[in-house]
Amino acid sequence: MKLVCVIGSLREKSFNRALFNAIQEIAPKGVEIEEAPIKDIPVYNADNETPLPQSVVAFKEALESADGIILISPEYNRSIPGALKNAIDWASRPAKKSSWYQRPVAVMGATSGSLGTSAMQLHLKGVLAHMGTRLMGFPEFFMSTANEKLNEDGTVVTDPHTREKITSFVESFVEHIQKR
């Protein structure tokens, strides 16, 4: 099984990249984890849809090659980071050729705040439901106070309880995918 992760932060040492690293480390046997990067995707403009920019083609191909997609994102101003929303919009194009339709999708997020990424996830799940994804609604995963759960350089999740929750979340998503 192949899972593709989309990291909603462009920051190299993002808490969400550390979360992605943890997913790669704890992936169940037989589950391959890859990233579909969004940093080179241009700002969406319908005038530039034909032909699609190469970075968009590569992103869409990565999503379409996956058995499931995990969106891992911070919360910016109580909502979806612009770079992530932009990538989501591009992958929904051209009309009737969305890379999201009927794809199994899960949402996770990490932040230094105490509320996790709950507001962002609420907005993002509304967008994903509208696009016809097979969204995993439960369990949910919110990593709050992430700065206290990582190693000194911020790249590895070291908190044992959080690692257990990550493992459980990924295992639940694999089960969600298999319920086709």
Image (cartoon, rainbow, N blue to C red):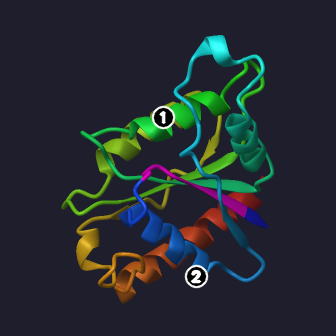
- Left or right of 118? Residue 89 is right
The magenta-colored residue range is 3-10
The residue nearer to you, when weighing 73 against 128, is 73
Q: In this view, does 128 lie above or below 137?
A: above
Question: Callout 1, which amino acid?
Answer: Lys
Question: Callout 2, which amino acid?
Answer: Glu
Find the distance from the CA under tag 1 to the CA under tag 2: 27 Å
Q: In this view, does 96 lie above or below 78?
A: above
Say whether residue 77 is magenta.
no
Total marks shown come to: 2
Mark yes or no: residue 100 visible: no
Tell whether label 2 touches label 1 (CB within 8 Å). no
Say whether residue 9 is magenta.
yes
Q: Quadrant of the N terminus?
A: bottom right
- Left or right of 114? Residue 168 is right
Instruction: Name which of mark 1 and mark 2 comes first in the sequence.
Output: 2
Q: In this view, does 106 lie above or below 172?
A: above
Within the image, what quadrant is residue 33 found in? Answer: bottom right
Identify the residue at the far left of this view: 114
Residue at which label 2 appears: 25
Q: In this view, does 116 lie above or below 159?
A: above
What x and y, as percent, mark residue 99? Answer: 72, 36
What x and y, as percent, mark residue 59? Answer: 69, 43
The residue nearer to you, when weighing 53 against 33, is 53
Within the image, what quadrant is residue 165 found in? Answer: bottom left
Mark yes or no: residue 112 visible: yes
Q: Residue at x 66, y 28 (%)?
A: 92
Q: Which residue is drawn at 73% across and 20% down?
A: 94
Q: Is mark 2 on a helix, strand or loop?
A: helix
Residue at which label 1 appears: 85
